[in-house]
């Protein structure tokens, strides 16, 4: 139960960072934070929560990470459904919280509520293939960072820093293309309030990150076992 609560809280915090940044942008559309502000908000949130509860649950906060760690041989198959459920519920609760906050301002324009998308729903109007590819690649790389940074051979105590900074970098890379998912729980949470297009395109932000996570997990097995 402690593990699942940790995953719930960690994912709640992560999606809060996404929705909070979206809310800030909606209220102050000319703000200077932009991509860098959103990226570092998410990265620093994961860094903080990894230190706070990572020792309890492993600090996944992401179904793609859970599947990636399973592929790397570092997570038990029977725990996957409960972890993913906790992550999705935590993210949805965060999105609901910020939606209720947002509608307290009568003239606010929320748009797609920070949802991920392709085609006309992509910030840069990138096609489905481009969005799918970047989500697979950056999620694979993210899992490789996680497995490597948490290895017993890596410097102790620094894993959350590497993981948080890597996540910020991947968001800088992917926000113009897909609005940066890497995380099916995050995509589901915002799609619930982002409208019909976000929901119809949600499948991609489950398939691509999980595929990328599994690829990253298998590659990590090869890398970390090298002498």
Image (cartoon, helix red, strand yellow):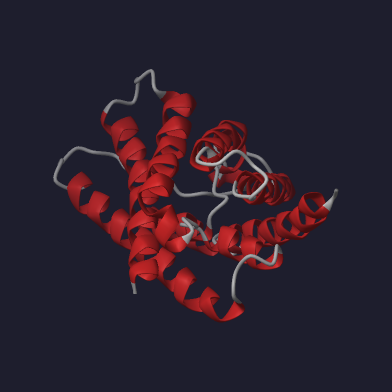
Rendered location of residue 32, percent (x, y): 38, 18
Between residues 147 and 213, which one lies in front from this camera angle?
A: 147
Tell me how many marks there are: 0
In the image, what residue occupies the spot 61% across and 48% down? 146
Left or right position of 28 against 47: left
Residue drawn at x 43%, y 54% is: 54
Q: Residue at x 37, y 59 (%)?
A: 91
- Nearer to the camera, 138 or 216: 216
Picture residue at 28% right of the left edge, 26% below the top: 28
Kindly tell me whether residue 226 is visible in this rendering: yes
Query: Position of 197 compared to 74: left or right?
Result: left
Q: Is residue 158 depicted above or below 95 in this figure?
A: above
- List x then y, in percent, for residue 11: 39, 56
Image location of residue 84, percent across then percent down: 48, 70
Q: Residue furthest bottom?
A: 78
Quadrant of the drawing holding the N terminus: bottom left
Query: Looking at the picture, does residue 46 appear above or below residue 62?
Result: above
Q: Nearer the viewer, residue 92 or 176?
A: 92
Residue at the right extreme, as displayed: 227
Left or right of 114 in this view: 174? right
Asked whether residue 113 is in view, the answer is: no
Q: Position of residue 154 (x, y in %)?
A: 64, 42
**Residue 191 or 73: which is nearer the viewer?**
73
The image shows residue 94, relative to residue 2, as above or below, that is above
């Amino acid at each position: 139960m402690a593990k699942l609560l940790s995953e719930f809280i960690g994912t709640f915090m992560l999606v809060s960072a996404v929705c909070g940044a979206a809310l800030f942008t909606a209220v102050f559309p000319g703000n200077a934070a932009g991509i860098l502000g959103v990226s570092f908000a998410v990265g620093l949130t994961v860094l903080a929560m990894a230190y706070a509860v990572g020792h309890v649950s492993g600090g996944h906060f992401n179904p793609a990470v859970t599947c990636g760690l399973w592929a790397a041989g570092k997570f038990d198959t029977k725990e996957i459904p409960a972890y993913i459920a906790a992550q999705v519920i935590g993210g949805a609760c965060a999105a609901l919280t910020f939606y209720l906050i947002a509608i307290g301002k009568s003239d606010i324009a929320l748009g797609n509520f920070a949802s991920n998308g392709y085609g006309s729903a992509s910030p840069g109007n990138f096609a489905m293939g481009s969005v799918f590819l970047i989500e697979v690649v950056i999620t694979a790389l993210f899992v490789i960072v996680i497995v490597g940074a948490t290895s017993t051979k890596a410097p102790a105590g620094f894993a959350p820093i590497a993981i948080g900074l890597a996540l910020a970098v991947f968001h800088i890379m992917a926000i113009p293309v897909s609005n940066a998912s890497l995380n099916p729980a995050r995509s589901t949470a915002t799609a619930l309030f982002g409208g019909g297009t976000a929901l119809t395109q949600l499948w991609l932000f489950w398939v691509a990150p999980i595929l990328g996570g599994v690829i990253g997990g298998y590659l990590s097995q090869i890398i970390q076992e090298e002498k």
